Image (cartoon, rainbow, N blue to C red):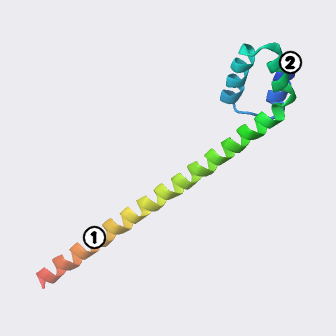
Amino acid sequence: MNTQLEKLLTQYNLSQKDQYDIKQIYALLPMHKQNNLLQNFWNLASRLIKIEEEIREEREILVWDKVENIKNIILHNREKRVKNHIEQLKSEL
């Protein structure tokens, strides 16, 4: 494996999956495209980092949406139990 590629992968702190994928693709490229990749690696890395950030943000939004949904379900069930309890008390009076 190309030591310059290894340095770049380490320098940009890409995920293990991204590093593996880049190494696999790099190995299949002709020499001139390998050189092009090394010269423009910062561009590829910045795009991958941006995509990772967007994915992380989307996951966070999804998690908070799920938390909000769960909270609403709990509140709805609690309200329903209280109403049932009130109706039960009314019927006992």
- Which residue is at a point 81% across and 35% down the rendered structure image? 12
Residue visible at 71% across and 37% down?
48
Q: Is residue 90 above or below residue 22?
A: below
Q: Position of residue 22 (x, y in %)?
A: 72, 24
Label of residue 80 in the image: 1
Mark toward the viewer: 1 or 2: 2
Residue type of the residue flagged with mark 2: Thr
Q: Quickly name the residue at label 2.
A: 3
Q: Quadrant of residue 39?
A: top right
Secondary element at image label 2: helix
Disc 1 vs disc 2: Cβ atoms closer than 8 Å?
no
Q: Is residue 1 visible?
A: no
Q: Secondary structure at mark 1?
A: helix
Relative to 63, 76 lies left or right = left
Which is more N-terminal, label 2 or label 1?
2
Where residue 43 sits in the image (x, y, percent)? 80, 36
The amino acid type found where label 1 is placed reads: Lys
Q: How far from the left and from the top, in percent, is residue 91?
A: 12, 81
Label annotation for residue 13: none
- Residue 78 higher or lower than 54, as above or below: below
Tell me the quarter of the image containing the C terminus: bottom left
